[in-house]
Image (tube, rainbow, N blue to C red):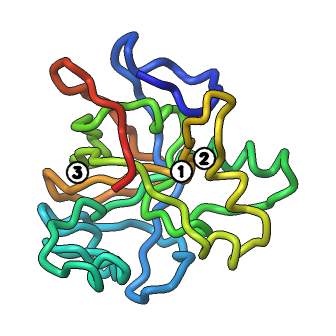
């Protein structure tokens, strides 16, 4: 498995991890950023209640235009707060929700987790489906930011650092401060790819 960014976080291959929810966000509009709120309700098989991207089939506008019958593998978007720390060191001051995520975490190397990892977050369970594919909207939000979250390594492989996507496998409420437990799928582990 390839770890996509240097980290001092526990490796997902060494055993269970535990992290925390830093912030939760929702927006009923197809905009870019999402405001932080007190709690979100995840609905099994649908996504975050009240969010524009919730649905059994795809809700991201570009994917709807391509094929509206596709299953929605992007019901929940999670970003690790450690990314914001790294971006701050590069001169980009961001807060949770700025990049459009529903759940901001700390203490888990989300990008290193394999497909099918189950995150128990508060009362809910989110099963990871893949990586967010950063797009030009990130540069529209902050010029130059796309190069910070979508870059090419020395070996030519593209790194996507703007978080992970998942589906809701068990509904429930998530609040800031909630613990996050990680359960890896049975091997073989497949690295997350863009969805």
**Which of 19/116 is in front?**
116
Identify the residue shown where x is 39% and y is 39%. 179
Q: Decide: is 54 above or below 126.
A: below
* Spot occupied by residue 51 in the image (x, y as percentages of width and height): 34, 78
Q: Which residue is drawn at 53% across and 71% down?
A: 36
Q: Estimate the x, y position of residue 157 in percent, counting from the top left.
A: 55, 36
Considering the numbered disc 2 on the image, is that residue within a helix, a strand or a loop? helix
- In the rendered view, tell whether residue 43 sits above or below residue 162: below
User: On the picture, is 118 further left or further right than 82?
Assistant: left
Residue that mark 1 sits on: 22
Extreme residue toward the top, this view? 14
Foreground mark, 2 or 1, reads 2
Query: Going 29% across and 39% down the picture, which residue do you hit?
Result: 119
Residue named by callout 2: 81
Give yes or no for contact between labels 3 and 1 (Cβ–Cβ under 8 Å): no
Q: In which quarter of the image is residue 94?
A: bottom right
Q: How far apart are marks 2 and 1 (CA)?
A: 8 Å
Compared to 44, does 16 lie above or below? Answer: above
Mark 2 or 3 closer to N-term?
2
Horizontally, is 176 left or right of 188 in the view?
A: right
Q: Using a 10 Å C-alpha cutoff, classify the residue at mark 3 as few (fewer than 14 neighbours), some (14 to 19) or many (20 or more).
A: some
User: What is the x, y in percent for residue 52?
Assistant: 34, 82
Question: To which quarter of the image does residue 13 belong?
Answer: top left
Dividing the image into 4 quarters, which one contains the C terminus?
Answer: bottom left
Q: How far apart are marks 2 and 3 (CA)?
A: 20 Å
Query: SS class of the residue under badge 1?
Result: strand
Which residue is denoted by mark 3 in the rendering?
124
Q: Do the residues labelled 2 and 1 touch (CB within 8 Å)?
A: yes
In the rendering, which numbered label is found on residue 6?
Answer: none
- Which quarter of the figure is the N terminus placed in? top left
Q: How many labels, in total?
A: 3
């Amino acid at each position: 498995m390839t770890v996509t960014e240097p980290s001092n976080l526990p490796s997902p291959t060494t055993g269970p991890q535990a992290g925390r929810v830093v912030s939760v966000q929702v927006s009923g509009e197809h905009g870019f950023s999402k405001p932080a709120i007190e709690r979100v309700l995840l609905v099994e098989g649908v996504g975050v209640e009240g969010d524009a991207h919730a649905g059994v089939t795809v809700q991201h506008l570009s994917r709807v235009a391509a094929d509206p019958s596709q299953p929605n593998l992007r019901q929940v978007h999670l970003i690790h707060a450690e990314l914001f720390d790294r971006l701050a060191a590069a001169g980009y001051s961001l807060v949770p929700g700025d990049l459009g995520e529903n759940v901001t975490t700390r203490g888990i190397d989300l990008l290193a987790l394999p497909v099918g990892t189950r995150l128990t977050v508060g009362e809910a369970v989110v099963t990871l489906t893949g990586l967010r594919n950063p797009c030009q909207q990130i540069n529209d939000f902050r010029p130059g930011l796309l190069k910070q979250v979508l870059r090419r390594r020395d070996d030519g492989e593209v790194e996507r650092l703007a978080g992970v996507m998942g589906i809701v496998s068990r509904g429930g409420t998530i609040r800031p401060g909630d613990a996050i437990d990680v359960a890896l799928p049975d091997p073989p582990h497949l690295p997350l790819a863009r969805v």
